[in-house]
Image (spheres, grey):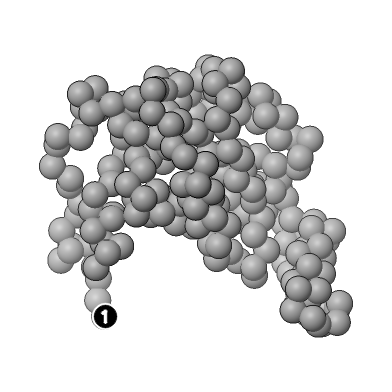
Amino acid sequence: MALLEDLNWRHAVKAYDSTKKVSKENIDKIVEAARLAPSSSGLQPFNVIVVENQELKEKLVKGALNPECMRDCSHVLIFAAWDRYTAERIDKVYDFTTDERGLERGRFGSYTDMLKKIYLDQPAEENFAHIARQTYIALGLALGQAAELRVDSTPVEGFDNSVVDEVLELKNLGLKSVSLMYVGYADTPSDWIAPMKKVRTPTEEFVIEF
């Protein structure tokens, strides 16, 4: 029941205490949870960018819908997806996989050929949409790990992707921002949602059984 207790503890914090910082040890654990997330075909087509530098956060603030949270939180995690699948990217992942497992390169050639056939001719929008969905699995695990550590967090889609991409020069890395995660410790008196009852769809309405 520990995971359920952790998830019941957390909420999307609306105000952070700028004087409190999350330890590097705990940030590393949160990022590691994201790194260990499953992804389609094991391609892991995204990166997590960790921003602690206050000057850089100030540059990102202009694209945030909740600028105070971005400014005051301890760290901003950016979940940035590949801009598209390429043959080179697919081969790099599977070359690494076979090397790590002590297998001959090309061992999964028929499978990677299938992936290339599926993805490489897709329209750019459809291609990126599939990649972007993978990041949400990692975001969910990162939120769960933060809760287990009793580190406050906020998942964020309310931001201007173009600002984040430009400030971090993500185009040069072949990446596009998808979502953010604010990490830190709540400013409890200012966190207006904290005293409110947590509300979710009742189990009997949420679960559909056949």
Neighbour tally class for label 1: few under 14, some 14-19, many 20 plus, Cα within 10 Å:
few
Residue 14 seen in the figure: no
Q: Position of residue 152 (x, y in %)?
A: 34, 40
Name the secondary structure under disc 1: loop
* Residue at image location 46% in from the left, 21% down from the top: 71
Nearest the camera: 40 or 141? 141
Please say if 93 is above or below 11: below
| Res. 2 visible in picture | yes
> Is residue 63 placed above or below 117 in the rendered structure?
above
Q: Which residue is mark 1?
A: 210
Q: Quadrant of the N terminus?
A: bottom left
Q: Residue at x 75, y 42 (%)?
A: 174
114 or 156: nearer the eye? 156
Amino acid type of the residue tagged 1 in the rendering: Phe
Q: Could you tell me which residue is drawn at 50 percent across and 57 percent down?
A: 33
Left or right: 139 with respect to 165? Answer: left
Instruction: Name the one closer to the observer, 173 or 188.
Output: 188
How many badges with numbers are in the image?
Answer: 1
Asked if residue 99 lies left or right of residue 129, the reply is right
Identify whether 92 is placed above or below 50. below
Residue in the foreground of this view, choosing between 66 and 77 = 77
Q: Quadrant of the C terminus?
A: bottom left
Q: Residue at x 71, y 35 (%)?
A: 170
Quadrant position of residue 32:
bottom right
Image coordinates for residue 198, horizontal then vertical, percent: 18, 45
The image shows residue 10 at horizontal and vertical percentages of: 28, 46
